[in-house]
Image (tube, helix red, strand yellow):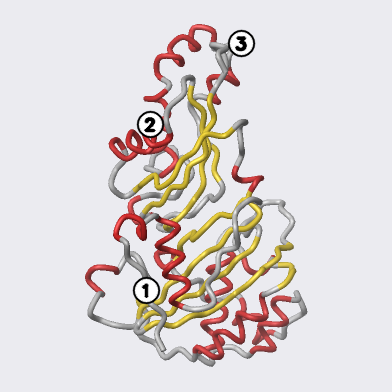
């Protein structure tokens, strides 16, 4: 790539605390994760962009390539990510480690670039991703409440976790999730849920849901529905009817229209898998936590792991 008009392409894993942002995607009058990242891209490519702006009528695509990122997950306001994938281009080559340092120097502490590497061609993570894994966290204790109130859903109501898992099982497979979204987009509402699993650890409930893609607020609708069933507020047969788009009686219809949508602060984009990535395993809490450490490089940094309990 010694052509002066060539670009060098990169893909990076990022994590962020969504509490501080109106969502991932750029907003007109509010701060977003994407805007923060693109501020760094503009800084990296400033010299070349200044040249291209002189020919902006003919260099629109090149300007866009050197000023915008592409991403795998478009998380909502207050939703977090332990790993989202982004791709971007630079007009000159950087060592991946240097790029990580540059990003993390200028980014706010609520956003971190964890991993980065150069790619032979430009990759759009949105279309290359084969699986997106989300994590939802309930907290039922009090000790850590002051420190994690915007990072989990604090819920002291009685929850039957067996019934919660029973309802989550219904969502696995391919279904029409038109009743589990607020989106008015003309998108195919059929989605495939690879797995919906509940794990418990002390005062925490973890719910992991994986699939290729999701509708707007779909996961929060699904978990809210399962939560209502676990608390005896709706029957399992009604959930099946809603999922199968069957006709409801007036009473059922009034309940279905008020399905609880769990709040965003407990939701995390946990991992984005590309074709070459190994499966993310979470059959036990220990396995989940160890994989989280591996994902974020904490294990390398602190030489720490969770030993399996007897």
Q: Position of residue 214 (x, y in %)?
A: 62, 59
Mark 2 burial class by Cα count in 10 Å: few <14, some 14-19, many 20+: some
- Mark 2: which secondary structure? helix
Q: Is residue 188 above or below residue 257?
A: above
Looking at the picture, tell me which residue is in the foreground, 98 or 154: 98
**In x, y percent, where is residue 283?**
54, 77
Q: Which mark is residue 29?
A: none
Residue 40: assigned label: 2
Q: Are marks 1 and 3 in contact (CB under 8 Å)?
A: no
Residue 142, position as x, y percentages in the image? 25, 81
**Disc 1: which residue:** 306
Give the residue pinned by disc 3: 58
**Label 2 – label 1 distance at C-alpha:** 36 Å
| CA separation in Å, label 3 and label 2 | 24 Å
Q: Kindly report which numbered mark, 1 or 3, lies closer to the viewer in this rendering.
A: 1
Occupied quadrant, residue 229: bottom right
Q: Height in image: 289 above or below 117?
A: below
Q: Between disc 2 and disc 1, whose residue precedes? A: 2
Residue at 49 percent of width and 44 percent of height: 25
Q: Quadrant of the N terminus?
A: top right
Mark 1 or 3 closer to N-term? 3
Give the side of residue 173 with respect to residue 58, left or right.
Answer: right
Q: Earlier in the sequence, mark 3 or mark 2?
A: 2
């Amino acid at each position: 790539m010694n052509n002066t008009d060539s670009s060098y392409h990169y893909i990076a894993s990022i994590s962020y605390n969504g509490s501080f942002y109106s969502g991932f995607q750029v907003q007109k009058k509010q701060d977003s994760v994407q805007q923060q990242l693109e501020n760094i891209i503009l800084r990296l490519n400033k010299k070349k962009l200044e040249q291209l702006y002189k020919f902006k009528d003919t260099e629109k695509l090149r300007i866009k390539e050197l000023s915008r990122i592409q991403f795998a997950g478009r998380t909502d306001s207050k939703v977090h990510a332990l790993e989202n994938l982004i791709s971007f281009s630079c007009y000159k080559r950087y060592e991946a480690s240097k790029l990580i340092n540059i990003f993390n120097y200028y980014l706010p502490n609520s956003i971190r670039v964890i991993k980065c590497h150069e790619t032979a061609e430009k990759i759009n993570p949105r279309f290359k991703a084969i699986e997106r894994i989300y994590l939802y966290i309930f907290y039922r204790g009090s000790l850590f409440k002051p420190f994690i109130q915007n990072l989990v859903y604090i819920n002291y109501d009685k929850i039957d976790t067996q019934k919660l898992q029973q309802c989550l099982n219904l969502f696995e497979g391919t279904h029409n999730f038109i009743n589990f979204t607020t989106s008015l987009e003309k998108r195919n509402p059929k989605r495939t849920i690879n797995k919906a699993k509940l794990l418990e650890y002390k005062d925490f409930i973890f719910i992991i849901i994986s699939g290729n893609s999701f509708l707007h607020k779909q996961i929060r609708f699904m978990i809210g529905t399962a939560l209502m069933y676990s608390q005896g507020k709706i029957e399992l047969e009604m959930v099946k009817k809603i999922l199968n788009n069957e006709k409801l009686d007036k009473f059922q219809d009034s309940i279905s229209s008020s399905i609880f949508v769990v709040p965003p602060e407990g939701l995390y984009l946990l991992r984005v898998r590309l074709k070459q990535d190994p499966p993310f395993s979470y059959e036990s809490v220990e396995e989940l936590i160890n994989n989280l450490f591996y994902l974020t490089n904490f294990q390398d940094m602190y030489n720490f792991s969770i030993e399996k309990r007897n």
